Image (spheres, rainbow, N blue to C red):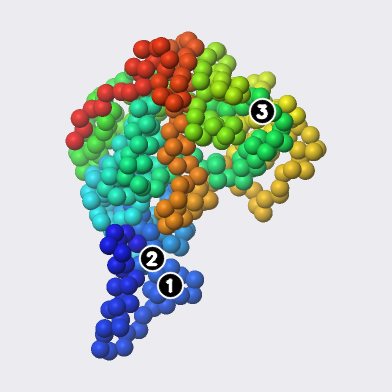
Amino acid sequence: MNDQSGFSRRHFLGGSVMAASAPWIIPSKALGRDGAVAPSEKITLGVIGIGPRCTYDLQAMLKLQDVQCVAIADVQASRRDAGKMLVDKHYGNSDCQLYRDFRELLARKDIDAVLVATGDRWHATASMLAAQAGKDVYSEKPCGLTIELCQQLADTMKATGRVFQAGTQRRSVPNFQQAVRLAQTGKLGQLKTLYASVYMPTLDNSWLPGELTPSRDVCDWNMWLGPAPWRPYNAQYVAGKWRGYYDFDSGARLLDWGAHTVDLCQWANQSDSSAPVSYEPSEKGITCLYENGVRLVLDFLATPFGDRGPNWMTRLGTCPVRFVGTEGWVETGDSGDTEVSSPALRSELQDAAGKVIGLDVSAHARNFFDCVRSRQPTVTNAEVMRNSHVACHAAAMSWMLKRALKFDPITQKFVDDEEANGLCSRPARPWT
């Protein structure tokens, strides 16, 4: 598919067959018959960073008949090898190529799109380098460690014209879509309060004890750190225990769930092009206010650990959201079930053909690859990501600074607060 000249591989194949002096026997699947997709028409996919979450994403993408994973880049040999085993087993060949440095993968002209599923510290930088290399990008969330990186990422996607999908897949899951529809169509009356479940924030600047750094072929520690500040190697970091450390994590961990739940609240309030204008922290959560008067509450108590707080009436799995209006409320979560405040609202819910859990990326991945073909914006395109992520980061800063903050969604700066604006970016280590 990746051919900027307009002379596609499909046309090349057709021309070669016609030019041959002797008859060729072409397998039907090579020509796209019997429901198969011809290799020349497949979207070629590269993977940057393959851990548990990426494996989950990739398993869904491998099922798509018009997508072909051809390469994996990861700084850890064990993860590279496991990824290759997964891909080669699925296709029944040994064609998947491996790279330690993802820049070598990006240099390949035959790759159309990439799945970026590194740790948080790499998401924005890897995505921007991919876009500049002419690749479309599906990035796991949080997509940027800071407000500035989220802004730069959105600007880069616009400047390069690349298709971008943030991995906030709940926008493509039916029960969340139905809850948003109730909010947007006035079935709840006038919207008053939106509740987004988030983790209890943490802020940890400590270091794990230094250990002997392995060889670059086993684990390229410098490349693993990337733009994050240097610190000594410890095997727990590369095993996934980096979460919670400020140098590696996004917004005091608020974006672990908030990138999903705040995003859904933004959507319900039809605020994809904006963000709340004020943020006020407390022991129980962070209360934000939109310009239209709707409140957004980031609730620390709505976690799977222990009892839910008073804002939550049901247990509907992880990442619950709750939308409250003057005429009723709706609440839903990753279980796929939905609760509403009245029989009248219940009658508005449509029975899905089958329950889809909130972690399922199948429809979200399908939307991305369809947009790779159509060049239309995805459901969580770069501008949607920018504003929902910025809202999360701004809320996290109010918690870290322990005071109320005012924010201008147009300039995307804090109002009369130099210290808060100083936290919108972090120094990047020269990792190259």
* Image quadrant occupied by the N terminus: bottom left
- Residue on which the image places disc 2: 41
Amino acid identity at mark 2? Glu
Name the residue nearer the viewer: 299 or 371: 371
Q: At label 3, which amino acid type do we have?
A: Leu
**Residue 198 location in percent, x, y?**
53, 26
Q: Is residue 53 left or right of residue 280?
A: left
Q: Quadrant of residue 88?
A: bottom left
Q: CA distance from mark 2 to mark 3?
A: 46 Å
Q: Quadrant of residue 89?
A: bottom left
Label 1: which secondary element = loop
At x 64% / y 48%, what residue is drawn? 355
- Mark 1 packing: few (<14 Cα in 10 Å), some, or many (20+)? some
Residue 431's label in the rendered image is none
Q: Which numbered dot is residue 32? A: 1
Residue 163 is left or right of residue 76, and the answer is right
Q: Are marks 2 and 1 in contact (CB under 8 Å)?
A: yes
Quarter holding the C terminus? top left
- Per the image, label 3 sits on a secondary structure element best described as strand
- 175 left or right, relative to 3: right
